[in-house]
């Protein structure tokens, strides 16, 4: 099969990855109602098709966080991405650079920042959580700045991890012999993945956290440290402290309410990402695309509004822009393409999406990203 859509990449990734890893990426919190809504609410949006407009020169170029982009899209941070393919973050970062879009390195990625920079000659965006150990936060910020990062994506919707039942069933959320045996069964069913990642992709550890967990020898040791570091006591005062620590652009990821968006602007954030963490945190939270318009109306003139959650095509990018986003972040799609075909898969995915965005703009009668607006949407009252 020649993969064309995200569904194709997902199917290929499912065949290649051990079940516990595939479900870690694909799953959401609780009954996965929010995960489903992210997709369903995008699908319900209808676009106006316009004809006899001069669309001989359509331009998908844009800027995100001050960075020129071939299309208004960035690769979102995904933990454990380096477990999906050999040195996965480095491969994805190369694909993103070639496609002209930003790559965001997760704090809990497998490849360290230095490896990603060496692989691309370019510093990515860097993602971070607020940890209990503020000294560790400062050290990670200093390392990111020294490595050339100038955009920090700070995740604010994870005071504690959501209840992800797939991880419970697959032994991802547990330790001990029983969980280890269950995961081992999944691993043995995927010998190709073992050769590519387990044997060829060493070392398998959270590369950015070696200084913080000097005694850690494997992923379990790092996971134990990280689980203990989630801080449910974080408030906006801590974001103001963070603003004082970071000299570059600061994007707060995980905003779903207008009041929180306004407070983010007041705290000094340079941008926000409207996000429900891919449906992985609060099940019954609104779909990101549904929360976006009110937030964009409230603060879009004061700050850069991005969104993630449910974006599965170039058509979806157009819809998000029409509802007020400056751009989108994608997570699962690039990880599935990476798991299926490595760097080449991510490259092909991004090329397909740029072409699809260009075609959507063409058929909607739009030649510039900046001209996409709500007038290109059919309102619910107009639906047949």
Image (tube, rainbow, N blue to C red):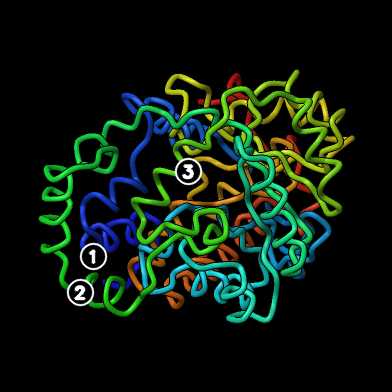
State the SS at label 3.
helix
Q: Nearer the viewer, mark 3 or mark 1?
A: 3
Front-most of residues 293 and 102: 102
Crowd around label 3: few <14 · some 14–19 · many ≥20 (10 Å): some
Residue position for label 2: 192
Report the Cα–Cα distance between label 2 and label 1. 7 Å
Describe residue 118's horizontal placement relative to residue 188 as left or right: right
Q: Position of residue 301 (x, y in %)?
A: 88, 35
Residue position for label 3: 226
Q: Specify whether residue 59 is in view.
A: no
CB of mark 2 within 8 Å of CB of mark 1? yes
Front-most of residues 169 and 367: 169
Image disc number at residue 139: none
Front-most of residues 201 and 231: 231
Query: Which quadrant of the figure has residue 205?
Result: bottom left
Describe residue 95's horizontal placement relative to residue 284 as left or right: right
CB of mark 3 within 8 Å of CB of mark 2? no
Q: Position of residue 317 (x, y in %)?
A: 61, 49
Q: How many marks?
A: 3
Image disc number at residue 16: 1
Q: Earlier in the sequence, mark 3 or mark 2?
A: 2
Describe residue 350's horizontal placement relative to residue 325 as left or right: left
Describe residue 347's horizontal placement relative to residue 255 as left or right: left
Q: Position of residue 86 (x, y in %)?
A: 37, 74
Q: Nearer the viewer, mark 2 or mark 1?
A: 2
């Amino acid at each position: 099969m020649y993969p064309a859509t995200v569904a194709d990449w997902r199917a290929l990734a499912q065949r290649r990855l051990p079940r516990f890893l595939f479900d870690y990426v694909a799953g959401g919190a609780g009954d996965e109602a929010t995960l489903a809504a992210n997709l369903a609410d995008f699908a319900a949006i209808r676009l106006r098709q316009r004809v006899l407009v001069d669309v001989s020169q359509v331009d998908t170029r844009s800027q995100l966080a001050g960075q020129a982009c071939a299309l208004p899209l960035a690769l979102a941070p995904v933990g454990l991405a380096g477990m999906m393919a050999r040195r996965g973050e480095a491969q994805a970062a190369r694909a993103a650079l070639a496609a002209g879009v930003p790559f965001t390195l997760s704090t809990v990625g497998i490849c360290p920042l230095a490896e990603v920079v060496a692989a691309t000659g370019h510093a990515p965006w860097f993602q971070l959580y607020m940890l209990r150990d503020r000294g560790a936060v400062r050290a990670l910020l200093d390392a990111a700045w020294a490595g050339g990062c100038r955009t920090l994506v700070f995740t604010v919707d994870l005071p504690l991890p959501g209840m992800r039942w797939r991880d419970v069933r697959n032994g991802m959320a547990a330790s001990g012999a029983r969980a280890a045996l269950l995961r081992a069964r999944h691993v043995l069913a995927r010998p190709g993945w073992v050769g590519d990642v387990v044997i060829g992709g060493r070392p398998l550890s959270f590369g950015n956290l070696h200084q913080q967990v000097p005694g850690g020898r494997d992923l379990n040791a790092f996971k134990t440290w990280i689980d203990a570091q989630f801080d449910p006591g974080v408030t906006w005062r801590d974001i103001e402290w963070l603003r004082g620590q970071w000299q570059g652009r600061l994007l707060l990821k995980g905003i779903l309410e207008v009041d929180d968006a306004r407070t983010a602007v007041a705290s000094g954030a340079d941008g926000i990402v409207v996000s429900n963490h891919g449906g992985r945190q609060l099940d019954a939270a609104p779909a990101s695309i549904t929360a976006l318009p009110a937030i964009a109306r409230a603060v879009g003139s004061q700050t850069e509004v991005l969104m993630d959650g449910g974006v599965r095509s170039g058509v979806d990018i157009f819809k998000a822009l029409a509802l007020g986003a400056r751009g989108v972040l994608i997570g699962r799609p690039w990880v599935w393409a990476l798991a299926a075909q490595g760097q080449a898969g991510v490259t092909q995915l991004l090329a397909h999406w740029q072409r699809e965005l260009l075609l959507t703009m063409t058929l909607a009668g739009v030649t510039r990203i900046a001209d996409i607006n709500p007038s290109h949407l059919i309102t619910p009252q107009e639906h047949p």
